[in-house]
Amino acid sequence: MMFSGFLRWSVWQKIIQNRRAGVEGNMKGEGRILGGVFVIGPGSQGIIFEHREKEFGDYADTTEVLKAVEKICKSHTGSKI
């Protein structure tokens, strides 16, 4: 995306929404690679949660990430975080 990504209105909308919601970012990086979050369970559980950034400003819902981690904890130890 590089520079053209910052010209998109949807990117600016997400930046504004994220700032208002208190999501912090450092604006560091090479500026072309989008990120993602994966929660992978042990053994044959495989991918429990996946978030791939589609454009700058997307971020994973932390509530959903925590739910996925709790699934691992429950299946692995029978306990909760």
Image: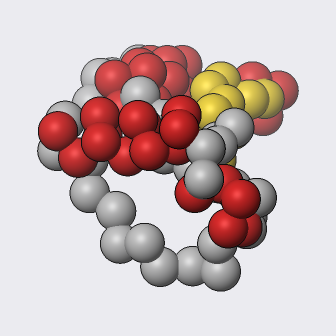
The image position of residue 40, as x and y in percent, is 67, 37
Q: Residue furthest right?
A: 44
- Residue at 35% x, 72% y is 26
- Residue at 65% x, 80% y is 30
The image position of residue 69, as x and y in percent, is 46, 31
Can you say which quadrant of the picture contains the N terminus? Answer: bottom right
The image position of residue 51, as x and y in percent, is 63, 33
Decide if residue 32 is in sight here: yes
Can you say which quadrant of the picture contains the C terminus? Answer: top left
User: 32 or 44, which lies in front?
Assistant: 32
User: 52 or 50, which lies in front?
Assistant: 52
Q: Is residue 20 left or right of residue 72?
A: left
- Residue at 30% x, 42% y is 16
76, above or below 52, in the image: above
- Residue at 78% x, 29% y is 46
Question: For residue 80, which quarter of the picture?
Answer: top left
User: 63 or 48, which lies in front?
Assistant: 63
Decide if residue 73 is in sight here: no
The image position of residue 56, as x and y in percent, is 57, 49
